[in-house]
Amino acid sequence: DSQSPSETTSGRNMDRHHYETFEKFGNDTFLLHLDNGRGFGKHSHDEMSILAPLQQCCSIKKSTFLRLQLLATEPYRLSDVMRESLTTDCLSPVLTEPHLQALDRRLQKVLDMVQECLVKGKRKEVVVDDMRGQRHGIWEHQNRSEQA
């Protein structure tokens, strides 16, 4: 075989990134970086270490928190929004049903982490107001859109 694969990995991202070198060209070899784009990971494994910054800092922008809360409720559930969005993709189905369900489960884990932070600290320190003076209700946004 003229190829000599080498792998570089980090943590649980082992199956996503690797590179190959081709020795067929002697010292004039080149590096080929491959990324299979498995950004949604395994549907059956929730990598909790990714929440370390949230757990350590216990701080989230209000706009982000409100959006995450919205995506955890009907009719805006994250899995439903993603499913609908991806139906028109030429590669459909992009995500399997277990992956879509994992999105909802993982989102709930993020919200649970924020709730733990709220229990430990003051709300103003945890949920940082980046929306001063802005209206932020989904219904208010829809009403403004309909009036325009």
Image (cartoon, rainbow, N blue to C red):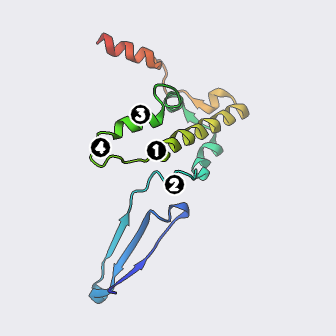
Could you say which disc has been placed on residue 81 in the image?
3
Using residue 146 as the reference point, say whether residue 107 is left or right of it.
right
Residue 134 visible to the viewer: no
Nearer the viewer's eye, disc 1 or disc 3? 1
What's the residue type where badge 2 is placed?
Lys
Q: Earlier in the sequence, mark 2 or mark 3?
A: 2
Q: Does dot 1 land on a helix, a strand or a loop?
A: helix
Q: Is residue 57 left or right of residue 85?
A: right
In three-dimensional space, the C-alpha distance between marks 2 and 3, rounded to whole angstroms, equals 20 Å
Q: What residue is at 40 percent from the left and 79 percent from the top?
A: 5
Task: Provide the secondary structure element on which disc 4 rests.
Answer: loop
Mark 1 to mark 2 CA distance (whole Å):
12 Å
Badge 4 or badge 3: first in the primary sequence:
3
The residue at 64%/31% (across/down) is 125
Placement of 86 over or under 27, stated as above or below: above
Question: Upstream in the sequence, badge 1 or badge 2?
Answer: 2
